[in-house]
Image (spheres, rainbow, N blue to C red):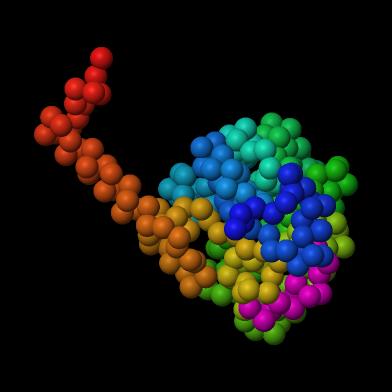
Amino acid sequence: MNPKSNYTKITTHVLQEMKLKSEKIAMLTAYDFSMARLLDEAGIDIILVGDSASNVMAGHTTTLPITLDEMTYHATSVVRAVSRALVVVDLPFGTYQGNSKEALNSAIHIMKKSGANAVKMEGGREILESVERIISAGIPVMGHLGLTPQSIHKFGTYVVRATEEKEAAKLIEDAHILEEAGCFSIILEKIPAKLGARVTEEIKVPIIGIGAGPSVDGQVLVLHDMLGITQKFSPRFLRRYHNFNEEIKGSVRAYIKDVKELDFPNEREQY
Ligand code: KIV
């Protein structure tokens, strides 16, 4: 079966239609042209140029250091590769939290330079003014609640969020706030499956989960995690579809051996 849905171009309206038809939405991250091309050709619905680039591309331990210019560079490379998927780009830490005018400038900058289709922002009520201002400028916004890695220093750990009634109630309230503000979709990260199901039932826009159980409208994973390139990060929600870590190292070892033993290049591989 071709896993690609029938849509020739994924838009925010198509995603809404998919929710109404109970057609699950498949989303992955990408940060460069070559990977984005593969994902798009394979039929992924949404490509997220995530600020997880800070970890998997730049080697930082958190998502906090990545800059607007660095995210713009990644997003521009991805957009060049994509013809079908919706491309969403993360607004990085420090570019939207404090001041809604600055938030709008950040969103306009990244949309204009990269050609992405939408931005993603972490948080609920506390970033409402920025979300509203960006949406009123015509820029689609995806929300992100639950474990929000840009706030890691506030949380202190990457454990499951909203297991307590009070935090779950705030998450539900924030989801309603983001929906009313006009977000076209919301990501829920690392929360109990029951809470993911409840938010998906109550909220009319598509809910995409990462560690939020099976009842949400779609799933997202970080590409390097699901391909098995990264190895140390191993949360319960992560399904690894490949072990590229071993495969790439195996290929590199074979190449080194061939070079050292004068096996490469052979007669057919020279001019
Ligand atoms: O930056 C990212 O990759 C993300 C996903 C984990 C949802 O925000």
Which residue does the image show at 61% across and 44% down from the upper left? Answer: 40
Q: Nearer the viewer, residue 245 or 69?
A: 245
Q: Nearer the viewer, residue 224 or 19?
A: 19
Residue 146 % position (x, y): 65, 69
Quadrant for the N terminus in the image = bottom right
What stretch of residues is rendered in magenta?
193-205
Residue 227 % position (x, y): 45, 55
Instruction: Please state the total of marks drawn on the protein image.
Output: 0
Is residue 152 left or right of 136 when viewed as pictured? left
Quadrant for the C terminus in the image = top left
Q: Is residue 199 magenta?
A: yes
Residue 241 % position (x, y): 45, 60
Residue 171 % position (x, y): 73, 73
Which residue does the image show at 56% across and 39% down from the upper left? Answer: 37
Is residue 32 left or right of 143 when viewed as pictured? left
Q: In the image as oriented, which residue stretches furthest toward the left?
A: 261
Q: In the image as oriented, which residue stretches furthest toward the top?
A: 271
- Against 22, residue 112 (above or below) is above
Q: In the image as oriented, which residue stretches furthest toward the bottom?
A: 165
Q: Is residue 98 visible?
A: no
- Give the quadrant of residue 17: bottom right
- Give the quadrant of residue 138: top right
Q: Nearer the viewer, residue 46 or 230?
A: 46
Q: Is residue 160 visible?
A: yes
Q: Is residue 212 magenta?
A: no
Q: Magenta stretch mostly in which secondary structure?
A: helix
Is residue 89 left or right of 265 when viewed as pictured? right
Which residue does the image show at 13% across and 29% down from the upper left? Answer: 262
- Against 54, residue 145 (above or below) is below
